[in-house]
Image (cartoon, grey):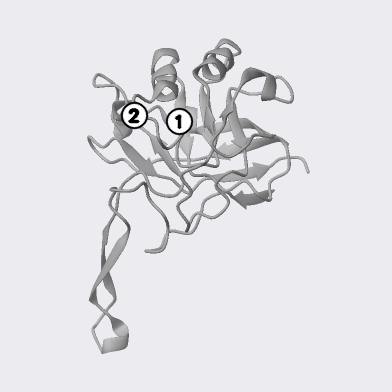
């Protein structure tokens, strides 16, 4: 069984939403300085790299990340490539086929470099989310920083996910992933009260 890492490398160079907290590392002790061990402090937004939004991110009454059902973050998934322009919205007719799983990952190619902020990545239309929820999709993953376009303030696609109880997985790296079925493993950290968590998202090829 082959694992495919679909998470970007996290370093101080990775881009975050303008105004959000970038990743920083403070080295408290360092073996190279003759300390007895190496010890670091990490500071960062929890919406960094590949991350799972908690419902509390867009719903005042929603679950925080420690309460998310982990079963929803592991299991069969479907990867689709979508032909969409930067800054555009993915609509129902842009889907190449019907999803084969309750977990759907959409590869748009509109945020190709995680270390460069590109505010023109594609978003998902609320109509698409409603359509996918009607087909049984319970988790949507994207290769962009958000399911909404970067300039959105009212976040209608996040709200559509709230209304239809669809989990949001953002910031994936899907450039080299073929379309089709995989097993997704994308477990969030058990961060009490937080609105998201970074994940080490991987796909597992089964029977290939």
Q: How crowded is mark 2: few (under 14 residues within 10 Å), some or many (20 or more)?
A: few
- What percent of the width, then of the height, locates residue 87? 54, 36
Q: Can residue 81 be seen in the rendering of this structure?
A: no
| Mark 1 burial class by Cα count in 10 Å: few <14, some 14-19, many 20+ | many
Q: Residue 176 appears at what percent x and percent y?
A: 68, 51
> Is residue 53 positioned above or below 30 on the image?
above
Quick one: SS at disc 1? loop
Q: Nearer the viewer, residue 154 or 40?
A: 154
At x 61%, y 13%, the residue is 135
Q: Please give the residue where the numbered disc 2 appears in the rendered image.
A: 153
In the image, is 125 to the left or to the right of 93?
left
- Residues at badges 1 and 2 in contact (C-beta under 8 Å)? no
Report the mark closest to the observer, 1 or 2: 2
At x 64%, y 34%, the residue is 84
The residue sitting at 30% across, 83% down in the picture is: 31
Q: In this view, does 29 lie above or below 83?
A: below
For this orientation, the residue located farthest to the bottom is 34
N-term mark: 1 or 2: 1
Expressed as whole percent of the image width and height from the top left, the position of residue 129 reads: 53, 19
Q: In this view, does 200 lie above or below 60?
A: below
Instruction: Give the left or right position of residue 138, taking residue 182 as reference.
Output: left
Residue at mark 1: 148
Left or right: residue 110 versus residue 200 is right
Left or right: residue 123 versus residue 190 is right
């Amino acid at each position: 069984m082959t694992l495919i890492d679909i998470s970007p490398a996290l370093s101080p160079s990775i881009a975050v939403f303008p105004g959000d907290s970038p990743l920083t590392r403070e080295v408290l002790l360092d073996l190279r300085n003759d300390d007895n061990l190496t010890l670091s402090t990490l500071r960062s937004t929890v919406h960094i790299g590949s991350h799972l939004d908690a419902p509390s991110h867009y719903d005042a009454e929603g679950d925080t990340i420690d309460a998310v059902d982990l079963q929803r973050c592991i299991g069969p998934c479907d990867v689709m490539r979508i032909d969409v322009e930067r800054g555009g919205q993915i609509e129902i007719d842009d889907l190449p086929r019907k999803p084969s799983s309750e977990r759907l990952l959409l590869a748009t190619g509109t945020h190709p470099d995680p270390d460069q902020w590109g505010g023109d990545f594609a978003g998902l239309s609320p109509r698409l989310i409603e359509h996918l929820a009607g087909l049984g999709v319970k988790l949507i993953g994207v290769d962009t920083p958000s399911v909404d376009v970067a300039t959105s303030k009212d976040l209608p696609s996040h709200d559509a996910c709230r209304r239809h109880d669809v989990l949001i997985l953002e910031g994936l790296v899907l450039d080299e992933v073929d379309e089709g079925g995989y097993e997704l493993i994308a477990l969030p950290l058990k961060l009490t009260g937080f609105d998201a968590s970074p994940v080490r998202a991987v796909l597992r090829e089964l029977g290939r």
